[in-house]
Amino acid sequence: MKDYIRLLRPKDWAKNFFLFVPSFFAKHIFTSSKVELLLAGFAAFCCIASSIYIINDYRDIEDDRKHPAKSKRPLASGKVKPAHAIIICGGLIIAGCTFGYVANPALEFLFVLGAYFFVNLAYSFGLKNIAILDMLILASGFVFRVKGGAIITHTDSSEWLIIMTFLLALFMAIGKRRDDILLKEVSGTEMRKSVSGYNLEFLNTMLGLFSAIIIVAYISYTVSPKTINRLGTYRLYYSSLFVIAGIMRYMQVVFVKQKAGSPTDILYKDRFIQVTILLWIVSVYIILYLLPSTPIFN
């Protein structure tokens, strides 16, 4: 049973909390009816994401067996039979669509969920072998989550929120590809075909570039008159301290510790990152929910 649970990659379900981001910034995250719908949407994304993971693992069985970490996955290690995995995959797709309908009977959310599924299906069936495009597709998955959360709660997802979500996800994808390059240098084997389109110099440059862009974009978002008008406060820029600290820590993990293979692993294991994210959430919560509103710009 443990291997079948691992097949679903439940540790990666943390990515689906991006569904809650639009509602959090719209200041109605604790409205009970919206929370219930968001939880249904969260379950839908968990099911669909796990079905994609199974399809990807099924297609990559032979390649994963060459990887020091991925060789331990249930399909690559032979602990779960491929036929059983396909049956579970079908069940997850049905369950995901059911939860998606519960979250939004008007079907807009199901459209986003379907787009997420088919884009990632195309990724699994070949697009992941195209350098740069592979990272763009990975980052787009987070944008689908944010858009899905906005649809469920009938919240306007600002262009800033979409841009920053995409940039942050792309930043982490670059760090992951850099880890693949380091693994190639150690083992002499390419773990994925797209690796041939990268080298350390290129990825190091991209990490430095996107770290700067993310920080500037977040600060610009917090001091934008449109944001201040929409949220009713000018104080959000205080939270940029934790964004900067989080970016610096991730860069330290990548360049000093040479461990950026999985952003979710960093989230679960790195205490500094955990504390930084918690402080960012607390600071934004206090600013948006507890402090009085400030004058609005004309």
Image: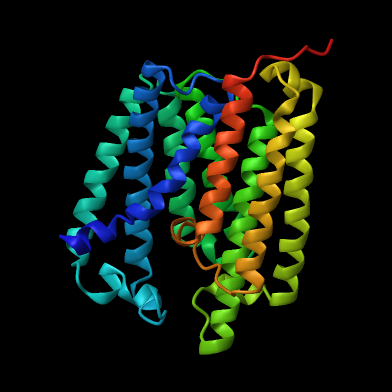
- Residue 57 drawn at (x, y percent): 35, 64
Q: Is residue 190 found left or right of 35 in the rendered image?
A: right
Q: Where, by quadrant of the figure, is residue 219 drawn?
A: top right
- Residue 226 drawn at (x, y percent): 77, 21
Q: Residue at x 19, y 53 (%)?
A: 87
Quarter of the picture containing the N terminus is bottom left
Residue 8 in sight from this viewpoint: yes
Please tell me how many numbered marks the rendered image carries. 0
Q: Nearer the viewer, residue 203 or 276?
A: 276
Residue 130 in sight from this viewpoint: no
> Is 231 rendered above or below residue 65?
above
- Residue 54 drawn at (x, y percent): 32, 58
Q: Residue at x 58, y 49 (%)?
A: 276
Q: Residue at x 69, y 58 (%)?
A: 248
Q: How is the image coloured?
A: rainbow
Q: Residue at x 45, y 23 (%)?
A: 152
Q: Is residue 4 found left or right of 40 in the rendered image?
A: left
Q: Is residue 14 found left or right of 156 in the rendered image?
A: left
Question: Which residue sits furthest left?
Answer: 1
Q: Nearer the viewer, residue 162 or 30?
A: 30
Quarter of the picture containing the C terminus is top right
Question: Which residue sits furthest right?
Answer: 298
Q: Where, by quadrant of the figure, is residue 84 drawn?
A: bottom left
Q: Nearer the viewer, residue 180 or 294?
A: 294
Q: Where, by quadrant of the figure, is residue 198 drawn?
A: bottom right
> Is 239 rendered above or below residue 131?
above
> Is 30 rendered above or below residue 19?
above
Q: Nearer the viewer, residue 168 or 241?
A: 241
